[in-house]
Image (cartoon, rainbow, N blue to C red):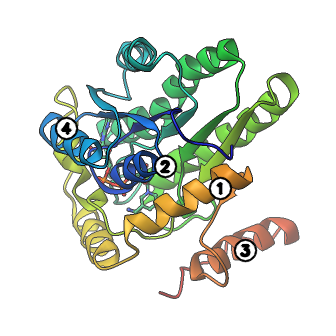
């Protein structure tokens, strides 16, 4: 997609972090923006920020883990702006720890937001985009965690692998059936956002986080690693360029240490070698 003016973008997880920056860059390109998030107060602030940039914007309180909530988001977007050309399935949450110490509810939470969020998004918005018949883009936020496997964050890695494989399959299916719809998969490295405090949005129907020593260690590590890391604006610009160029894999550019870790994993598979422990040298 080369022209953004007066088209409509829907961004989930838009109240903070990468999602908010995505909403801002779309607004700056003259798009109408639908901001969706579970955090109502931050969503109101985010809509104000985007509106101040001159865009027409609405906020829709959405739980991406709920099929009916994402259906309502799709309807609200089309009711307000008539059509949707860009969908960013971006909302996501993080927790860490040892796989056997984490609870069923820990698994349920990450799968619900990170996996089902993308599934609900594509199930509701792809038919809408196909019906429109115009040029559209879907950007699913995965992670470099979908291209490598590291200890103490296994549930997150698993859910992000699901986002990447789902996106690749979606890419093939749309290329064969509705080639006017492009797909990109955003695989960020560490970004300076609120991801380490994801538990603020843990659903009420799930038990409190299982706080073990390894869970604490993992959360301290992600807090330290994301603080002062890449500004989310850089990711938003990367997405914009990816949409313009129709690029599927939106990866850190150049000789990034996360790419080295991903290459090591791919090499393990190519050589049928046991998994190498090769964390990014950051
Ligand atoms: N920050 C990083 O280092 C990093 C790296 C790789 C990938 N990512 C991915 O980037 C995406 C954005 O995360 P971020 O880093 O901006 O973190 P963030 O916590 O700043 O933003 C995530 C947003 O998702 C929202 N959210 C959480 N649960 C939700 C739900 N059920 N329904 C709707 N919204 C919900 C939050 O309220 C928040 O606004 C996530 O998918 C994350 O996994 C982040």
Mark 1 and mark 4: Cα distance apart in space: 28 Å
| Dot 4 crowding, Cα within 10 Å, few <14, some 14–19, many 20+ | some
Please name whichever residue, 258 or 45, is drawn nearer the observer in this view of the structure.
45
In contact (CB < 8 Å): disc 4 and disc 3: no
In contact (CB < 8 Å): disc 3 and disc 2: no
- Sooner in the amino-acid sequence: mark 3 or mark 2: 2
Mark 3 and mark 1: Cα distance apart in space: 21 Å
Q: Where residue 280 appears, x then y in whole percent?
A: 54, 81
Tell whether circle 4 marks a residue whose Cβ is less than 8 angstroms from ligand 1.
yes
| Residue depicted at x 49% and y 23% | 120
Tag 4 residue: 39
- Sooner in the amino-acid sequence: mark 4 or mark 3: 4
Q: Is residue 210 above or below residue 274?
A: above
Query: With 180 as the anchor, is 160 left or right in this view?
Result: left
Q: In this view, does 210 lie above or below 257?
A: above
**Mark number displayed over residue 242:** 1
| Dot 2 crowding, Cα within 10 Å, few <14, some 14–19, many 20+ | some
- Sooner in the amino-acid sequence: mark 1 or mark 2: 2
Q: Is residue 120 above or below residue 51?
A: above
């Amino acid at each position: 997609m080369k022209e953004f003016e007066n088209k409509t973008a829907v961004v989930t997880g838009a109240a903070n972090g990468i999602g908010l920056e995505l909403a801002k860059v779309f607004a700056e390109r003259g798009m109408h923006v639908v901001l969706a998030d579970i955090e109502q107060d931050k969503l109101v602030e985010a809509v104000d920020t985007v509106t101040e940039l001159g865009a027409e914007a609405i906020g829709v309180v959405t739980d991406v883990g709920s099929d009916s909530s994402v259906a309502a988001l799709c309807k609200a977007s089309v009711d307000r702006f008539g059509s949707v050309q860009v969908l960013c399935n971006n909302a996501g949450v993080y927790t860490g720890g040892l796989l056997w110490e984490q609870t069923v509810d820990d698994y349920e939470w990450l799968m619900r937001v990170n996996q089902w969020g993308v599934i609900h998004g594509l199930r509701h918005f792809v038919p809408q985009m196909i019906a429109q018949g115009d040029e559209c883009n879907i950007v699913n936020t995965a992670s470099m965690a979908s291209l490598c496997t590291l200890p103490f964050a296994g549930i997150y890695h698993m859910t992000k692998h699901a986002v990447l494989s789902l996106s690749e399959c979606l890419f093939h299916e749309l290329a064969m059936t509705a080639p006017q719809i492009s797909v990109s998969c955003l695989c960020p490295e560490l970004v300076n956002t609120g991801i380490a405090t994801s538990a603020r949005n843990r659903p009420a129907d799930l038990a409190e986080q299982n706080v073990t020593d390894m869970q604490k260690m993992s959360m301290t590590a992600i807090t330290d690693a994301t603080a002062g890391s890449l500004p989310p604006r850089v990711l938003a610009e990367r997405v914009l360029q990816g949409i313009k160029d129709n690029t599927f894999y939106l990866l850190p550019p150049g000789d990034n240490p996360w790419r080295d870790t991903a290459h090591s994993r791919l090499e393990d598979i190519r050589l049928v070698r046991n998994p190498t422990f090769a964390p990014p040298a950051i």
